[in-house]
């Protein structure tokens, strides 16, 4: 299943420190939780959506309700909590492993149907929200070469583009989809 966490951060003075914590401490802690398979973090290049997005592959909802998750990953934001705004969490039906998005690529998310992504020349992966916020109920995910994105030009309404902030982390027994090719 795909677990997404989206938010913005309201304190510019501590945002760089929070980003270091999230990318360098929190993601490695999460990927060490039994049932987490992949984790990658992104920053929005589009307006109209939360600034930060984390995309994880997990075995199921029970991973997020377990003690190991609470100890290693969930709930350790107390120092930052007052600055985290526009926070959303969703669990989407299984699309397999999400694609690893590299520095020369972007992640595209669309909540208004796959057609906009198809017109952009990419193959969308459908996701259906099954737990947590359950909004948006349907989303389509795709990656595209950064050179084809023409930022600010002809990006269809409802499509949000994200640049990777980290590489995709994987558990020791899981290989990212890009490495399999």
Image (cartoon, grey):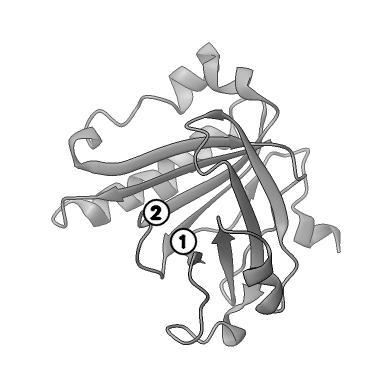
Picture coordinates of residue 70, whole percent (x, y): 45, 18
Would you say the residues marked 2 and 1 are in contact, meaning their CB atoms lie under 8 Å apart? yes
Query: Separation of disc 2 and disc 1 at Cα?
Result: 9 Å
Picture coordinates of residue 117, whole percent (x, y): 65, 70
* Quarter in which the C terminus is drawn: bottom right
Residue topped by disc 1: 165
Residue topped by disc 2: 52
Q: Please report the residue visible at 51 percent of the width from the left and 12 percent of the height from the top.
A: 67
Q: Please report the residue visible at 62 percent of the width from the left and 17 percent of the height from the top.
A: 62
Q: Closest to the observer: 150 or 75?
A: 150
| Dot placed on the residue nearer the N-terminal end, 2 or 1 | 2
Picture disc at residue 85: none
Tell me if residue 169 comes above or below residue 94 in the rendering.
below
Looking at the rendered structure, the number of numbered marks drawn on it comes to: 2
* Quarter in which the N terminus is drawn: top right
**Mark 1 neighbour density, 10 Å: few (under 14) some (14–19) many (20 or more):** some
Tell me if residue 138 comes above or below residue 1 in the rendering.
below
In the displayed structure, does residue 52 sit left or right of residue 155?
A: left
In the displayed structure, does residue 43 sit left or right of residue 62?
A: left
Q: Please report the residue visible at 33 percent of the width from the left and 52 percent of the height from the top.
A: 19
Q: Closest to the observer: 173 or 56?
A: 56
- Say which quarter of the image contains residue 33: top right
Q: Secondary structure at mark 2?
A: strand
């Amino acid at each position: 299943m795909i677990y997404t966490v989206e938010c913005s951060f309201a304190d510019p003075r501590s945002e760089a420190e929070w980003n270091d914590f999230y990318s360098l401490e929190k993601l490695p802690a999460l990927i060490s939780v039994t049932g987490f398979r992949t984790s990658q973090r992104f920053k929005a290049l589009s307006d109209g959506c939360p600034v930060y997005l984390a995309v994880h592959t997990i075995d199921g909802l029970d991973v997020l309700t377990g003690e190991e998750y609470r100890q290693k990953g969930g709930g350790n934001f107390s120092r930052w909590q007052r600055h985290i705004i526009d926070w959303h969490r969703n669990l989407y039906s299984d699309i397999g492993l999400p694609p690893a998005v590299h520095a020369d690529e972007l992640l595209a998310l669309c909540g208004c149907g796959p057609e906009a992504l198809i017109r952009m020349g990419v193959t969308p992966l459908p996701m259906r929200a099954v737990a947590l916020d359950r909004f948006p109920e349907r989303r389509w995910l795709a990656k595209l070469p950064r050179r084809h994105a023409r930022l600010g030009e002809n990006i269809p309404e409802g499509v949000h583009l994200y640049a990777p902030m980290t590489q995709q982390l994987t558990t020791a027994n899981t290989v990212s989809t890009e490495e399999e090719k």
